[in-house]
Image (tube, rainbow, N blue to C red):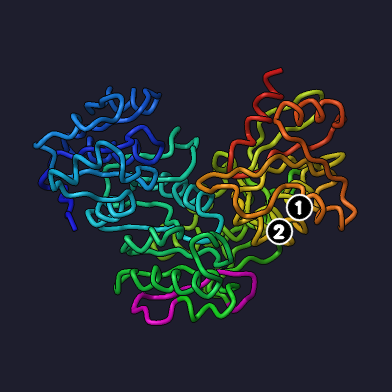
Amino acid sequence: MYKIDFNDPKHFHFIGIGGVSMSGLAQILIKRGFNVTGSDNNKSLYTDNLVRLGANIKFPQKAENITDDIDCVVYTAAIRENNPELIAVREKNIPCLTRAQFLGQVMANFENTIAVAGTHGKTSTTSMISQVLLETKEDPTISIGGFFSAINSNIHVGNSDTFITEACEYTNSYHEFYPKYSIILNVEEDHLDFFKDINDIRKSFNKFANNTSDTGCIIINKDIPDVAEITEGTKAEVVTFGTTADADCYAKNISYDDFGNGVFIPVYLGDELEEIHLGVPGEHNISNALATILFCKKFGINDSTIKTGLEKFRGADRRFEHKGTINGINVFDDYAHHPTEIKVTLESAKKYPHERVVCVFQPHTYTRTKALLKDIAKALSLADIVILSKIYAAREKDIYNISSMDLLKEIEKYGTEVYYFDTFSEIEEFILKKCINNDLLITMGAGDIVKVADELLAK
C-alpha cells in the first residue's frame, strides 16, 4: 500500500474532491505542502474553498484529468469502477487509496491519534472531545462526520501532533486505522446489508480494538454485553466508563435541568470530580461525556479544563439541533435512524418543555427498516404523534418488499397516532394544520428529512 510521508510531500489527486469528507482531508495535505489536484462533477462551496487554499480542481470528471505526474489517487466508495478517471488511473498504474486507507495513512503521521467508534454517538463524542482539546494548548487536527460550530466546519487542520476522527464500522473501514487511543461507545446491530449479524459486528469491533497501539489505551463502555470479548487479545490498556460503580468512570447524582440537559458528578477511579452541567440533553450525552472524561484523564488534561470544555459544548450539527420556531412550535432536527438513537432522542425531547412531541421520521435504507422494523416502531411510539415519509434508499434499490406503511402498521399496535405521506410538501402542509402552540416538532433520519424543517421555517 502507498505510504504517505508528511516529510516528503507529493502530488495527490482526489476523485470526488467536493465531498464534505474528501474536501476536508485534502486540506490536511495542502497545509503540509502537498500538491493537491482533484475533480468533481460540480462546483460547490467546498471546492471554492480548496481553490482558495491552492488546489487545482477540474470539472467534470474525465480521463484527461489524470496526468503522469500524479503520485497517488484518493477516491471514495461512491466512485464506481467505470468512472473515467479511475479507469485512467488503472491504465497508468498510479497507486490508489480509498478514503479509509488514506485517512489511516494520514493518521500514521501523527503521534497522538484518537479514533471514536460505536454504532451511534460517534459524531457527538468526537465533537465533545474536540471541544475539550480546543480548551488546551493542543491545536488538534479534527475530522468529524458533521458540522461542528466550534471549528465552523467538519474539519480543523491543527499544528500539533494530535489527530481525532470518527471511526465508522460500515464495510470495516475503521480497520484501516491504528490509533493510540480507541474509544468504543456501543456495539449493536446495524448495517445488516454488510454485516451478517451481531456476532459478525462484534468480531469487527474486536479487530478494531486490536488495531490500537500496544502502548495505547482503549476507552470502552462497560455496559456493552460481554465487553471483555470486544477487547480480547489486545495488548493496549483497557479502561471503562458506564452506568455502574464498577466502571473506571461513572456518573452519580444524575439530574436534568429544565431543558433536559444532564447534571451529574463524575467519579473517576473512586474519586469524585466537580459537578458537570452539560449544555446538551439526554442520558446518552451523559454517557458520551463519561467517555470524554475518561479519555481526557488518560490523555493528561486537568479537571478544570475538562469541565470547561464539556460545559461549553453545545452539540454537533443534526444532533437534537434546535432549528427555530414557527407559530409557537419549537422545531428540532436529529440524525437518529437506529432504534437506540431514536429512543434516546425522543426521551431527550420528552424532557424539553413541550405540549406534544411530534416526530417526522424518514426511515433510512430498506435493509435497516426491514431488519429492525419492530424495534424502530417501538422507539417511535415514544412520540405523541408520528409522521412517516418514504424510506430513504441511500445506496440501495427497492427490492426488499418493505415500505413505510409496514412501519406505520407496527407503530399503530402501540396506540400511537401515526400518519404517512408520499411527499415532503404534504408533510409540511399537514404539520401546519396539526401542530399547535408549544408542540415540539422533530424531523428525524439520516437522509434529507431536514428539508422539511428548513422549508417550514422559511415560510
> For the magenta stretch, what is the residue range?
231-246
As helix, strand or loop, the secondary structure at mark 1 comes to helix
Residue beneath the point at 33% across and 60% down: 177
Q: Position of residue 206 (x, y in %)?
A: 43, 74
Q: Which residue does the numbered mark 2 point to in the structure image? A: 373
Q: Nearer the viewer, residue 190 or 459?
A: 190
Q: Amino acid at mark 1?
A: Asp
385 left or right of 135? right
Residue beneath the point at 30% across and 58% down: 112
Label 2 crowd bin: few (<14), some (14–19), many (20+), radius 10 Å: many
Asked if the stretch drawn in magenta spans residue 237, the answer is yes
Q: Position of residue 87 (x, y in %)?
A: 23, 42
Q: Nearer the viewer, residue 15 or 317?
A: 15
Residue beneath the point at 60% across and 61% down: 287
Answer above or below: position of 20 versus 239.
above
Q: Quadrant of residue 180?
A: bottom left
Q: Is residue 319 visible?
A: no
Q: Amino acid at mark 2?
A: Leu
Tell me whether circle 2 and circle 1 mark residues in contact (CB < 8 Å). yes
Q: Is residue 178 visible?
A: yes
Answer above or below: position of 165 versus 388.
below
Q: Which mark is residue 381?
A: none
Q: Earlier in the sequence, mark 2 or mark 1?
A: 2
Answer above or below: position of 84 versus 3.
above
Asked if the stretch drawn in magenta spans residue 219, the answer is no
Q: Which residue does the numbered mark 1 point to in the structure image? A: 406
